Image: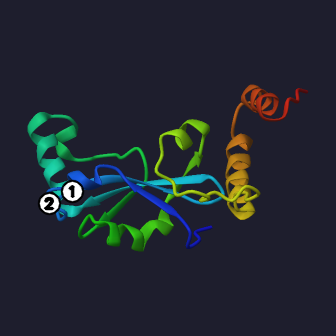
Amino acid sequence: MIVKKRHIRIDAENWIHDPEQAHVDVVVTFPDATRWISNFYTIPCIESMRKDYLTSGACLDGAYWCASTPVIIVDTINRERIEQVVDVFEYFGPVEERDLKSSDYPPDFFDKGSRMDPWYISWHAVRLKQMLDQADVDVRERLKEQLFGESS
């Protein structure tokens, strides 16, 4: 899925004081108007968070921590390092009209006729089918109607 032409947005990129103890959210956009996301953390940053959790009691004795998106652990947070590892991102959704109005995408960045990689869609469809096979009949019927306008 990953192609050379991409736009990488690093949240708080200009605010990083210590690149060896930092974390950032990174969104990569491709010309097919798909967005992919991951969080980058350094090990010292994670250790600092764990200590804060121990002190504050935010989680069970600092024993766990769960991110909302995939986590990538790196030695340093900078654009060069991030560009080296963007291939492990998770699908974040399509670029929407509001994103285009408030973005810094270069002119003519998006390919008008481009579509998401069919392999990626098939892979997730198989996973969804496996989950639906385990779901209650009512859940399956509601989803069929929502997705395809069908009902039994």
Residue 22 numbered tag: 1
Dot 2: what SS? loop
Residue at the image point whose x is 28% and y is 66% from the top: 78
**As drawn, is 105 to the left or to the right of 68?**
right
Residue 71 x, y percent position in the rendering: 37, 56
Question: In the rendered image, which quarter is residue 56 located in?
Answer: top left
Colour style of the rendered protein structure: rainbow
**As drawn, is 139 to the left or to the right of 91?**
right
**Amino acid at pointer 2:** Asp
Residue 18 numbered tag: 2
Dot 1: what SS? loop
Residue 92 numbered tag: none
Residue 95 x, y percent position in the rendering: 59, 46
Residue at the image point whose x is 14% and y is 60% from the top: 18
**Amino acid at pointer 1:** Ala
Residue 3 x, y percent position in the rendering: 59, 71
Question: In the rendered image, which quarter is residue 83 located in?
Answer: bottom left
For the residues labelled 1 and 2, say whether their Cβ atoms are less than 8 Å apart.
Answer: yes
Residue at the image point whose x is 71% and y is 56% from the top: 121
